[in-house]
Image (cartoon, rainbow, N blue to C red):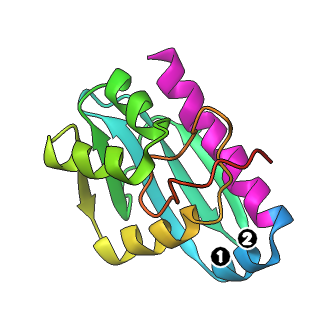
Amino acid sequence: MLKFKFLLWLMTRLMQRAIDTNAACARYVAGKRLEFQIQTVDKIGRWFRIEDGKVRSFAGLSGAPQFTMTFRNAAKGFEILSAKDGKEAFLAALHDEDLTLSGDFVEVMWFQGFTAYLQPNKCGLLQGLPGRPHATMAHP
């Protein structure tokens, strides 16, 4: 469970770094306001706010997220979000019901576009998010 919580916390820093270091990413998020959360079925998670070109995250769950990614458990969440085979792991998780998406799917698609700007680390961090290129393994 701690690895999952740490990964969610780290995601905030990776998203903000992408905005701060990539002008195209900064343009993509300009003017956007989004609240979403990533959680487990038993309500362990974190919620995120993208607003005014900044990403913030908060422990716990939001009262009204625009979309939610819910993993079967923390171990599955960590496994999927850190998978090296990104897109395949994400799609398999949806198929196997290890992951469910709820809420505004237009916002899910926007977020998918945003994740394309994130740089994975050597262990494939964030490769499981929708929109992550699975062949690129460049280390920032």
For residue 5, side relative to residue 137 (left or right): left
Is 78 drawn above or below residue 105 in the view shown?
Answer: above
Can you tell which quarter of the image residue 118 is in? bottom right
Q: Residue at x 56, y 32 (%)?
A: 7
Label 1 element class: helix
Q: Is 137 one of the magenta-colored residues?
A: no
Which residue range is magenta in the image? 1-19
How packed is label 2: few (under 14 Cα within 10 Å), some, or many (20 or more)?
some
Front position in the image: 60 or 84: 84
Q: Residue furthest right?
A: 21
According to the image, label 1 marks what residue? 29
Residue position for label 2:
53
Across and down, in percent, residue 75 comes to: 36, 21
Residue located farthest toward the top when viewing the structure as drawn:
2
Name the residue located 75 percent from the left edge and 75 percent from the top edge: 26
Labelled pair 2, 1 in contact (Cβ < 8 Å): yes
Q: For the residue marked with disc 1, what is the amino acid? A: Val
Q: Position of residue 132 (x, y in %)?
A: 51, 58
